[in-house]
Image: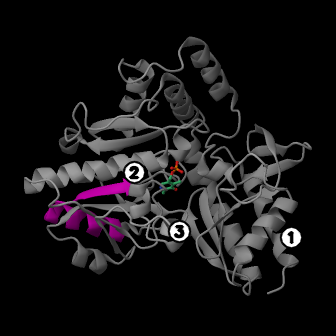
Amino acid sequence: MNHHPTLIKNYGPPAFNAVRGQGVYLYDDADNEYLDFGSGIAVTSVGHSHPKWVAAMHTQAATLTHCSNLYGIPGQQKLADRLVAKAGPGRTLFCNSGAEANEALIKLARLHGKKLSGEEGKRFTVVAAKNAFHGRTFGGMGATPQEKIQGGFRPMLEGFKFGELNNIESFDQLVDDSVAAVFIESIQGEGGLFPAESSFLQELRALCTERGALLMLDEVQCGIGRSGHFFAFEASGVQPDAIGMAKGLGAGFPIGAIWVSEPYAALFQPGSHGTTFGGSPLACAAANATLDIIEEEQLIQQVAANSPAWHAQLQKLAQKYPELIAGIRGAGYMVGLVLKPEGLNLSITAAAREKKLLVVPAGNNVVRLLPALIATPAQLSESVEILDAIFANTEA
Ligand SMILES: *Cc1c(COP(=O)(O)O)cnc(C)c1O
């Protein structure tokens, strides 16, 4: 398809017009049915148009959609209670997207550094990871040291340094008394599905505690059940000081959030930060409905139970096509198929779409599989069968 003439060509030309979704299926304007293993980039966590989610949104839209944070919002208070119950003693603040959540975390780091050093502008460095992705705002871009993200937009926001994920020595060298926070994705998504190892997160936790830096985890993509835990970092047993969330939280309605542990939550005071739309009644109804569905349908347990067999099928696929597939990475319903021939991830993504399977490319030659948490073992197997048929017709 061509670009629409009145839309800025900010994205590549679309493959089709999407008009309808139902469960793990997406439909185009010719009513073709696609098995959607992209989920709007890890967003539609309970599937498209889940009846309970739709009913909650109808009711809330007919009651109150927006009132601003000048007033208390009961749905927001309820959602905050639920996120604190998951993350630990602390407080939450709502926004509209992943980049905004991360922006708030970077502001938190600066307030923390100011308090520690007693002076603004002295201790403000955030140490992130080289292969990270934290969003497209100036804060998020600053923490995302990729030429394809930063190029054309310099000068960047200052105050970022970068270590190697899963290399504790590289962080050990960087975290000095100029550093306010360490900021890591528990599982790198856009960068190519690189999980932070449990031992690395544990060592990072100890390092941050010792040096007074906050440990902030970006769970925007890997959080809200996708990994088989509510938060992906739970697998490591580590307790972070702050968490960023978004994508899967509203299951298709924009909402982001940060959780900050009890001692640091007080760094934000009235006037520190703000947003007109963040945490609106409608957005919180979407997130509360999403959490209700995840709990009622035990979706996190389902992801944990279903993923080993699916991962094994994908491993077998990698063994069947050793010239094409290097292996798989990830956790739960967040899996990367790591390909060998340069650029193959783009042609496999297109070929999958032709066979009515939607996947998303990532990083350097990775195909990302991000099914909704409701995907059944049969649907997971179907994705492998479709990929098998594609690789069978692909030349090394
Ligand atoms: C998608 C993503 C973001 C940015 O979220 P937006 O909602 O697109 O602003 C930030 N961090 C991670 C890890 C992401 O995957």
Determine which residue is flagged by label 3.
Answer: 191
Give how far apart the Cα atoms at labels 1 and 3 are.
27 Å
Q: Could you say which quadrant of the image residue 6 lies in? A: top right
- Label 2 Cα crowd, 10 Å radius (few <14 / some 14-19 / many 20+): many
Judge whether 152 appears above or below 365 on screen. above
| 238 falls in the magenta region | no
Q: Could you say which quadrant of the image residue 14 lies in? A: bottom right
- Label 1 Cα crowd, 10 Å radius (few <14 / some 14-19 / many 20+): few
Determine which residue is flagged by label 2.
Answer: 102
Residue 266 visible in the picture: yes
Give how far apart the Cα atoms at labels 2 and 1 are.
40 Å
Task: Find out whether the residues at labels 2 and 3 contact each other: C-beta distance under 8 Å.
Answer: no
Q: Amino acid at mark 2?
A: Asn
Magenta residues span 199-217
Front residue of this view, candidates 342 and 316: 342
Q: Position of residue 9 (x, y in %)?
A: 70, 56
**Mark 2 CB near ligand 1 (8 Å cut):** yes
- Residue sticking out furthest to the top: 63
- Label 3 Cα crowd, 10 Å radius (few <14 / some 14-19 / many 20+): some
Residue 385 visible in the picture: no
Q: Nearer the viewer, mark 1 or mark 3?
A: 3
Q: Position of residue 353 (x, y in %)?
A: 82, 60
Residue at image point 83% right, 43% down: 27
Predominant secondary structure, magenta span: helix
